[in-house]
Image (spheres, grey):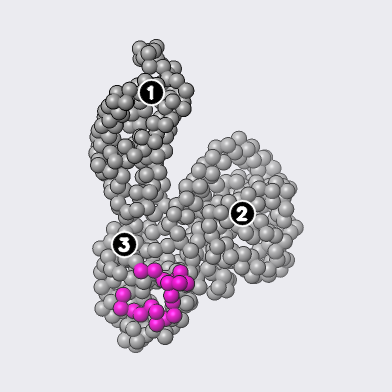
Amino acid sequence: MLLTTTCHPTGDWSGRRVLLLSHAFSISSSFFLSYRLLPNYRHYLRAGAFAPGPFAAHAWLLLLIFPLWYLLLEALGLNSATRLSWRAVIARTVRLQLFGLGALSALIFAFKLQTVSRLIIFGFCVLLVPISIATRWLFLSVLEAHRSHIYNIARILVIGTRERAREFIRQARQAEEGHYEVLGCFEPEAAQAPREVEGVRVVGSTKILRCYLFAHPVDIVVFAMPPERVPEAKDLMDAALELGLRVVVLPDFYVQRLGYTVDQQQVRIDSFFGRPVAALSSVPRHSSYLFVKRVMDIAISALLLLLLAPLLALLAILVKLTSPHGPVFYRWKVLGVNKKPFVSYKFRTMVPNAEELKPQILGRNEMVGPAFKMRDDPRITPLGRFLRKYSLDELPQFYSVLKGDMSLVGPRPPFQEEADRYEFWQRRKLSIKPGITCLWQVNGRNHIHNFDQWAQLDLEYIQKASLWLDLKILLKTVPVVLRGRGAY
């Protein structure tokens, strides 16, 4: 995904698309509700003469309403994602409906459209006021949350301590407060490095950058090195890209000399803090896909939490009854995107002192690599074994999806101690949001006993991520879970 100059861009094309979608939803739903509901109140409205005919006699009006309302929305500035006060939004929306009602009434009168119910048109314009305001708020809130999750509190490392780096840090400080954090600087020549640059600590020489990137949460690596450092920078960029981090190159640094090309979809020209840069990424980050994915996460997780509420309550009671000395939920502290820690929840499936007993069974680990998997783990309770078999213990994780810490589809989140043991190439698993299900889940699950295979499946997903692949994984997950295949 391209880097942008602020965390909350305004008036951009992605924001316009979201607003156009919200307007289309508002118009369609208001028209349908007006047709279905308002005729029931003809008696109270004294509108018996305007009873509607078949829906087809009115539905064609949408072909007229959509372009007419689009022009009015443009004229009143409601098609822009620029922030408006709610007073301005309400006032402009009311004016929009008055103008629209007048225009539609004039057209109906001019063309003598006797089959069109004026009650339906009037009700449509009245209903559209609260519905359009509510949907505008909802759609923009989702967009804001989506952008905040991607861009907010972006942790930046700057490679270079000369004037380019100083200028960049000054520009970063002028960005919206709290959206970016410059963690530190690295200098190619440690002997020449100052202790700090513009108040930002110089961590050390670029010789230790690879180890630092592996061990610390970083989102963006900015290269502000002089052109003569091209050979050295190539290795450093490769290391950052291998981890799935975003790389930004300041304009006087020659990207083509490094061997990166636009054809490889690694390099795109963008604006970062108001200056042109070359943005590199080894991870597909398409804003439209990520937005739709987030909307799908919110919709499905909210719906499932609502529908499964009785089952969740029953399982909570069973966990407490069968193992009364421990908590109902297991607080699962794991790592998210670029090693950002978060707490997720599962139903507890083990005895209360499971962590204390873990050192005694580490030698029986059946997974080759940093993850711990054991078929007959003695710490699991009888109920816990049933919950794990059908993945019922993971149902509370839909709350983490709703919050935005996780997604429905993505690599499984690791513990800190697991991630610390990753090989360098495996660290790229953490370059996207973790998920409840993944390729590993539907392609062998616990029958895969080598962590390298597991990691390869995750990297395959990261490289090929798309809405269609997400849907395929979700559909494949259902029979895998219902059959309890590969779970223990």
- Residue 34 picture location, percent across and down: 41, 25
Quadrant including the C terminus: bottom right
Q: How many marks?
A: 3
Seen at 61% across and 53% down, the residue is 472
Splitting the image into 4 quarters, where does residue 175 fall? bottom left
Seen at 54% across and 40% down, the residue is 303
Q: CA distance from mark 3 to mark 2?
A: 34 Å
- Amino acid of disc 3: Thr
- Residue 348 picture location, percent across and down: 63, 49
**Magenta segment:** 251-269
Is the residue 127 above or below the residue 229 in the image? above
Q: Which residue is mark 1?
A: 116
For disc 1, the neighbor class at 10 Å (few under 14, some 14 to 19, many from 20) is many
Is the residue 41 above or below the residue 150 in the image? above
Q: Residue furthest right?
A: 376
- Asked whether 328 or 10 is in front, the reply is 10
Seen at 67% across and 59% down, the residue is 443
Secondary structure at numbered mark 2: helix
- Asked whether 417 or 401 is in front, the reply is 401
Earlier residue among tags 1 and 3: 3
Is the residue 459 above or below the residue 95 in the image? below
Q: Which residue is mark 2?
A: 473
Residue 328 visible in the displayed image: yes
Seen at 31% across and 37% down, the residue is 68
Q: CA distance from mark 1 to mark 3?
A: 49 Å
Q: Which residue is mark 3?
A: 5
Splitting the image into 4 quarters, where does residue 232 fall? bottom left
